[in-house]
Image: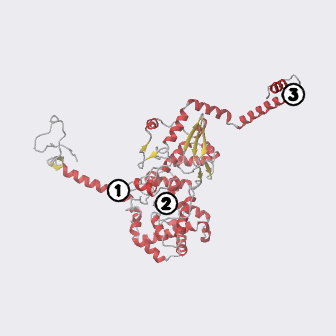
Amino acid sequence: MEKELFDGQVTKRGGGQVSRGEHDQPAEIGQTSKVSITTPEGAKKTIPRKEELQKFRVLLAAAAEERSSLYQNSNGRPKIQRVPVMLRDHKNSDKYYQPKVTAFGPIHHGEPKYERAEKRKLELAVHFVRDSEQNEADLLKKVDVNIKVLRECYDEEATKDYDDDSLAWMLFVDGCSTLEFIYKYDNLESFKIKRDQVAFAEQDMFLLENQLPYQLLKHLMISSRHYEHWKYSIESFVQMHIGDQKQELQPGATMEPEPTHLLEHLLTRMLGYPPKKSETSASAQPGAGGAQNTQPHDEHVAVSMEPGQTHLPKKNKKKSMSSAQSFRNVQELQGAGIHFRPSEDSSLGDIDFKSFICCGFLYLPKLKVDDSMGPKFMNLIAYEMCPNFQNNFGVTSYISFLDSLINHPDDVKHLRKKHILRNLLGSDEEVAQLFNEMGTDLVPNNAIYRRVKRMIEDHYQSRWKTWMGQFFYDHFSKPWILAFIGVLTGLGLSAVQTWYTANSDNPSSPCKTLLEYLKARGY
């Protein structure tokens, strides 16, 4: 259908045509402003533009409200949803996002391959009721009373096939079994659960599509006399999955503000900056929840809550914006005189660079690489990429930074020798492949490591530093060269000792002469 937009005359109030020469002012849109549209029959219909704009604004506001309701619950927290499609379309993505043995929550509930785990979950739920010294009917009633709010914690597509009663029962069993699994983690053999099944179930608990609302877990344990013990067991369980990061954990410690689910709890702990109420209340963004209100750990760069916005010192901003990364991997940096050291604090944000004369030192947090690392980090990245989840993309930026350093197995080998990477996965080639796979199609927050990258680049581009570093790397980094220098030094010292011994008894020897000279002058 052919349409001629703005085909008619636009009249001003009071009549008369509009010309560019009349004060060079645009026409005022008034009640007489019209839009002519040509219909297939050729007849023109005139529609008041003001009315159409008003309708458009109403639709726009409704669309924005609908979008917000799709991805956020009434508390402004991001809803539990499926992995974003841009990650789901990757090759072999199921191994990162699909549960292996157990489905928690409604997204994968009822799939045949998880039926065997349902019996174990029911058994764990029964023991939770007994260990928490609560009444099962009272616990189920708590879930029933709050089912509307709990339903809001999920994307509508995930719960549309469940009525309130079936959803409440599912969440009741899943919540109780999760808490008992965590609480009895060191004694799960008593439930006849094999260790390999335990390991897979742990991975399943930190999948984005397998999350349970934290408020569900709180409803189930808050009435127990042992509430603090249950809460501490959750903190310990999450702490255990951080890896090589060492943090002090006291009984009664908890997250402030309360996390949305276990995956967000893990995200905040791994980034190493648990937020405080006094800091987050003033800077909270509409629709933000949990970890998104935190500040990046790199204290030298202040990052705003909106990804990509930064507040850098004026004297450095122009320089940092104009410099581009030219180094490619660990081997190149090592050849340029940059040495790698483990950070004292192993939170993911603890990356720093220091320069001393011709040498540079890049400090990286320790990281354990095993079978659980891929699913864990990819689901953290997926959570950061969820719509309407305002955050600073801390994990995404960390993986992107490591991916820029690791291209070959030799890069992994060097980081492993420096005790930065602990390889429990297998060969160094597998680790390099894992990082290259995880780093595909990521959009990091460049502000987080901007200072570090700029300092590395400055060192890398400094010709004399690079030359000196390359010289020492080429001539003094090989073991046989060091051994050769040691042999030469030993031979030289032996020659000096032989010469001294041979001439010490001669009255006119240089040694005797020197000693007499020093003695005569009172030395």
| 3 vs 251: above or below | above
Q: Quadrant of residue 243?
A: bottom right
Q: Earlier in the sequence, mark 1 or mark 3?
A: 1
Tag 1: residue type? Answer: Arg
Closer-to-camera residue (293/279): 279
Tell me which numbered mark, 2 or 1, is placed earlier along the sequence.
Answer: 1
Asked whether residue 238 appears in the rendered view, the answer is: yes
Residue holding disc 3: 504
Residue linked to disc 1: 67
Q: Which residue is mark 2?
A: 255
Image quarter of residue 247: bottom right
Q: Secondary structure at mark 2?
A: loop
Q: Earlier in the sequence, mark 2 or mark 3?
A: 2
Label 2 Cα neighbours within 10 Å, binned few <14 / some 14-19 / many ≥20: some
Q: Report the number of discs.
A: 3
Residue visible at 57% across and 51% down in the picture: 346
Identify the image quadrant of the C terminus: top right
Q: Secondary structure at mark 1?
A: helix
Spatial distance from mark 2 to mark 3, Cα to Cα? 77 Å
Mark-to-mark CA distance, 1 and 3: 95 Å
Q: Where residue 33 sits in the image (x, y, percent)?
A: 16, 46
Please name the residue shown 58% across and 59% down the image. Answer: 240
Mark nearer the viewer, 2 or 1: 2
Q: Residue at x 45, y 65 (%)?
A: 215
Residue 88 shows in the view: no
With respect to residue 199, does 479 lie above or below?
above
Task: List x then y, in percent, for residue 258.
Answer: 46, 61
Residue 98, numbered circle: none
- Nearest the camera: 1 or 492? 492
Left or right: residue 470 versus residue 136 is: right
Q: CA distance from mark 2 to mark 1?
A: 29 Å
